[in-house]
Image: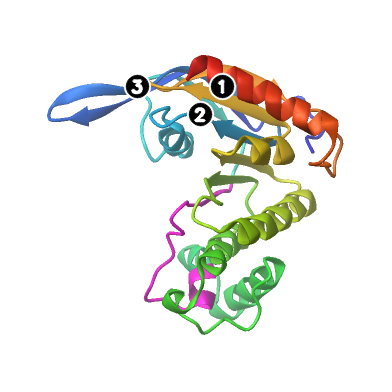
Amino acid sequence: MPNDRTEPALVLSRVSASFLDDHKTSPALKDVSFSVPESSFTSIIGPSGAGKSTLLRVILGLMPSTSGTIVRNFNRPAMVFQNYAIFPWLTTLDNVAFGLKMAGVPKKERERIAREKLKEVGLVGVDDRYPIALSGGQRQRVGLARALAVSPDLLILDEPFSNLDTITAEALKLDLLKIWENYGMTVLMVNHLIPDAVELSDQIIIMGAHPGHVEDVFSIDLPRPRDIRATPFFIQVDRLTERIRKIS
């Protein structure tokens, strides 16, 4: 739910980026422009090769852009990865507390925060378990709890539901919405499922491929909580699906 402030959390203007392969430059992104309102939920969708994950890395400064400008009006970004990216040699509690440890937070305080965040994401009683003993859904929740532990003002998610079964993904989706509403933070999510994007988002950015570029930006003005069985929801899904078919 975006607030009334006029300053967006993120603005990209004609941003391009390239990979260096075998001493040759391959364009990954070309002239990407969009803005993300503060406290909004924005989804990025598009085909393989559209540079969606690359775009996230550029936004976070993990990969340089080759041209264009990025205005970052956030201070504490955090990311949840598609493949969980939690450390197999650390317990659940230590995984969640890892960012706090790197920030120099005392052990007692970081463990208190880690337990609090595990409870928020529905994980209780697994503090001492290692990732090998957790299900895929539990691992993704550990990744989410780790991101929340640093109190982010921008939460980035890279296809967080893609490795989960339908039931687990639906439960995590509901929890994510509650967390977003409670924190009031900005969320930017890469997703490949159109109904999920419509259900969750205030804004959907459609990207095309080879190289990655913005084809269109859709605003979703359905009231929350969204009724995914109602006609207005299906109209939005059909509208978005048809637009994507035209660029595929």
Apparent side of residue 244 relative to residue 98 in the rendered image (left or right):
right
Which tag, 2 or 3, sits closer to the chain's start? Answer: 2
Q: Which residue lies under the disc numbered 2?
A: 46
Marks 3 and 1: which is nearer the front? 1
Q: In the rendered structure, which amino acid carries the disc numbered 1?
A: Ile
Q: Where is 245 relative to 123, above or below?
A: above
Q: Where is 211 relative to 109, above or below?
A: above
Q: At numbered mark 3, what does the secondary structure look like: helix, strand or loop?
A: loop
> In terms of depth relative to the viewer, which is nearer, 75 or 239?
239
Q: Which mark is residue 66?
A: 3
Location of residue 28 in the rendering, given as x and y in whole percent from the top left corner: 35, 25
| Quarter of the rendering containing residue 196 | top right
The answer for how far apart the CA atoms under marks 2 and 3 are is 22 Å
Q: Residues within 10 Å of mark 2 (few under 14, many from 20)?
A: many
Q: Quadrant of the N terminus?
A: top right
Q: For the residues labelled 2 and 1, say whether their Cβ atoms are less than 8 Å apart.
A: yes
Q: Where is 16 relative to 192, above or below?
A: above
Location of residue 226 in the rendering, given as x and y in whole percent from the top left corner: 82, 41
Location of residue 83 in the rendering, given as x and y in whole percent from the top left corner: 43, 56
Residue at image position (51%, 67%) is 139
> In terms of depth relative to the viewer, which is nearer, 92 or 240?
240
Q: Which mark is residue 244?
A: 1
The answer for how far apart the CA atoms under marks 3 and 1 are is 27 Å
Q: Is residue 92 magenta?
A: yes
Q: At numbered mark 2, what does the secondary structure look like: helix, strand or loop?
A: loop
| Quarter of the rendering containing residue 231 | top right
Which tag, 2 or 1, sits closer to the chain's start? Answer: 2
Magenta segment: 76-96
